[in-house]
Amino acid sequence: MIGRERRKLRVRSKIKGRAGSPRVTIFRSNRHIYLQAIDDQKKNTIASASDLKDKDLAQKLAKDLINKKIKKIVFDRSGYKYHGNIEKIADSLRKAGLEF
């Protein structure tokens, strides 16, 4: 198991998403970034965004969550270090009105 996967499992064991405060997880490939808001109790995706369709994916995800009356989230960085694009996305989610 590589380092990022190990960090991901360690962090994932401590945080849980609920309907009122879903877990927003991030996946970063070599070319694209994907965001998902997940309710871990019901095991379904509430909202998602990717930079394939949206230029500002954090704003799109925040708008979708606010339309569903969700203001609080749990941010899951998926084992990535909190800098660069991960930090920019987290700051954009905060500026859009989400709390975490």
Image (spheres, helix red, strand yellow):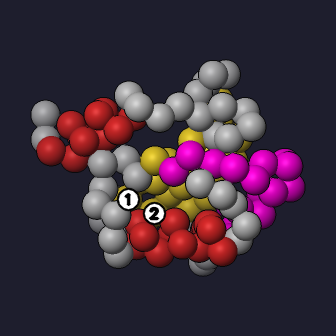
Q: Residue tagged by mark 2?
A: 33
Across and down, in percent, residue 80 comes to: 30, 56
Q: Residue tagged by mark 1?
A: 28
**Mark found first going from the N terminus, 2 or 1:** 1
Q: Which residues are magenta?
A: 59-75
Instruction: Classify mark 2: residues with Cα within 10 Å, few (<14), some (14-19) or many (20+).
Output: some
Is 66 placed above or below 15 here?
Answer: below
Judge left or right: residue 97 versus residue 37: right
Judge left or right: residue 45 versus residue 63: left
Quarter of the image with the C terminus in it: bottom right
Across and down, in percent, residue 43 comes to: 61, 24
| Amino acid residing under circle 1 | Arg
State the residue in front, 62 or 32. Answer: 62
Is 47 placed above or below 14 here?
Answer: below
Magenta run includes residue 73: yes
Is 14 placed above or below 73 here?
Answer: above
Across and down, in percent, residue 10 comes to: 29, 34
Magenta run includes residue 23: no
Is any part of residue 40 visible from this angle?
A: yes
Q: In the image, what residue occupies the spot 45% across and 63% down?
A: 33
Secondary element at tag 2: strand
Across and down, in percent, residue 91 comes to: 54, 72
Instruction: Classify mark 1: residues with Cα within 10 Å, few (<14), some (14-19) or many (20+).
Output: some
Answer yes or no: do the residues labelled 2 and 1 have beta carbons within 8 Å? yes
Q: In the image, what residue occupies the spot 47% across and 75% down?
A: 88
State the residue in front, 34 or 74. Answer: 74
> CA gap, disc 2 to disc 1?
5 Å
Quarter of the image with the N terminus in it: top left
Q: In the image, what residue occupies the spot 15% across and 44% down?
A: 3
